[in-house]
Image (cartoon, rainbow, N blue to C red):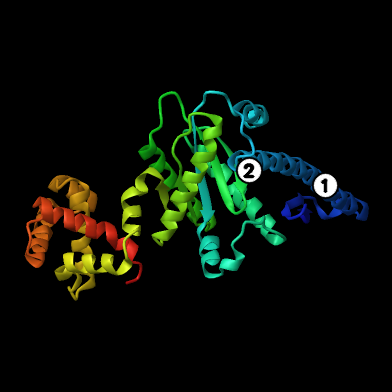
């Protein structure tokens, strides 16, 4: 067997030749080498066509998002090749590589908004193809484009309507699958639905803001909706030390438990209890523990905190403290 690499601007694969030793001649080997070169050239041509098409698409969406296109008719004419249709509602999803984002946070001068260069182009192309392939399993048709270091999906909303909870769950599963398959850690921001083509600009801005808010919470591999960020954003407006004091005062007894595992389980149980509207059976299902275990943990929480967990005032304080916890970072 002989192996001949097939290359374009990157290593695409191999041309394999299976033959018996008596079939081998120098001319035979030269022919196979030339064949691998021809395959490489054809793939290069095909890739050039794809890149040119993708560049035009990115330029169109960049003009639309930045407000250079002010007429819906112009947007529809230019976006026709991208599948944009008058009257069809859509929503923008923005995605970023978590590792790249946090690198930009450490080295802000590198944050950019310039397109990647050199070897990074190959890396971005590979990530683009991975994302496009995986998200092809979505229940919605979409157009994919990029804006600097952000991957974007413009999802079409079917006539049956927009089920954000369902799509969020589906996206979360896809992010985990992508990470397992490729090691790529992505996070997603979701904008609000746009009822016309020009509204895509606002949906994109909302999706970027939602993504930035998720990163502000120091999270990774998350799906953050613009609509779901309002309460947390109010907390963001308060001084960090005030939030810390409220958190410590509210959960003081639990925070001083020396057994870290017990502390974690009690806080997790409280969170699930309030998430399920104080339903014991649902709490036990969410935690995968027996109902009696939930009752025991909640009674212990009440004893340690010195409150009744179903008291409206106390439950509100505890819910707020739980919501504040992710904002406190490593404190």
Taking the spot 46% from the left edge, 50% from the top edge, the residue there is 209
Give the residue displayed 53% in from the left and 53% down from the top. 96
Q: Quadrant of residue 220?
A: bottom left
Q: Is residue 293 above or below residue 103?
A: above
* Residue 281 shows up from this direction: yes
Question: What residue did someone put label 2 on?
Answer: 62
Q: Which mark is residue 11?
A: none
When the figure is inspected, residue 215 is found, relative to residue 330, above or below; the finding is above
Tell me which label, 2 or 1, sits earlier in the chain. Answer: 1
Is 105 or 96 nearer to us in this picture?
Answer: 105
Q: Nearer the viewer, residue 17 or 292?
A: 292
Residue 288 seen in this snapshot: no
Rendered residue at 82%/50% (across/down): 36
Q: Residues within 10 Å of mark 1 (few under 14, many from 20)?
A: some
Name the residue that disc number 1 marks.
41
> Residue drawn at (62%, 29%), measured in percent from left and top?
71
Return the x and y of residue 18 as percentages of the image width and height: 77, 50
- In percent of width and height, residue 12 lies at 72, 52
Locate residue 187 relative to residue 304 in the image: left or right. Answer: right
């Amino acid at each position: 067997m002989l192996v001949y690499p097939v290359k374009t601007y990157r290593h695409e694969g191999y041309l394999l030749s299976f033959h018996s030793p008596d079939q081998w001649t120098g001319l035979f080997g030269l022919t196979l080498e030339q064949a691998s070169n021809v395959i490489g050239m054809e793939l290069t041509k095909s890739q050039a066509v794809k890149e040119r098409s993708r560049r035009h698409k990115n330029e169109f969406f960049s003009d639309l998002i930045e407000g250079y296109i002010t007429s819906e008719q112009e947007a529809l004419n230019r976006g026709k090749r991208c599948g944009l249709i008058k009257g069809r509602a859509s929503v923008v999803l923005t995605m970023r590589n978590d590792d790249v984002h946090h690198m930009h946070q450490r080295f802000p001068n590198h944050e950019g908004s310039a397109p990647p260069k050199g070897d990074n182009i190959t890396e971005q192309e590979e990530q683009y193809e991975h994302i496009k392939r995986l998200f092809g399993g979505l229940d919605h048709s979409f157009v994919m484009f990029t804006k600097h270091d952000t991957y974007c999906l413009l999802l079409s909303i079917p006539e049956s309507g927009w089920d954000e909870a369902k799509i969020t769950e589906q996206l979360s599963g896809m992010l985990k699958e992508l990470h397992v398959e490729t090691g790529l850690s992505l996070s997603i921001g979701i904008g609000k639905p746009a009822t016309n083509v020009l509204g895509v600009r606002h949906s994109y801005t909302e999706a970027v803001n939602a993504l930035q808010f998720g990163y502000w919470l120091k999270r990774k591999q998350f799906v953050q909706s613009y609509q779901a960020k309002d309460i947390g954003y109010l907390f963001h407006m308060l001084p960090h030390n005030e939030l810390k004091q409220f958190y410590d005062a509210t959960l003081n007894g639990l925070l001083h438990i020396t057994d870290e595992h017990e502390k974690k389980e009690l806080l997790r149980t409280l969170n699930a209890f309030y998430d399920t509207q104080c339903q014991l059976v649902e709490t036990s299902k969410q935690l995968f523990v027996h109902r009696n275990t939930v009752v025991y943990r909640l009674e212990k929480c009440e004893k340690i905190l010195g409150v009744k967990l179903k008291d409206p005032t106390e439950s509100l304080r505890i819910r707020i403290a739980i919501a504040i916890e992710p904002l406190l970072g490593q404190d």
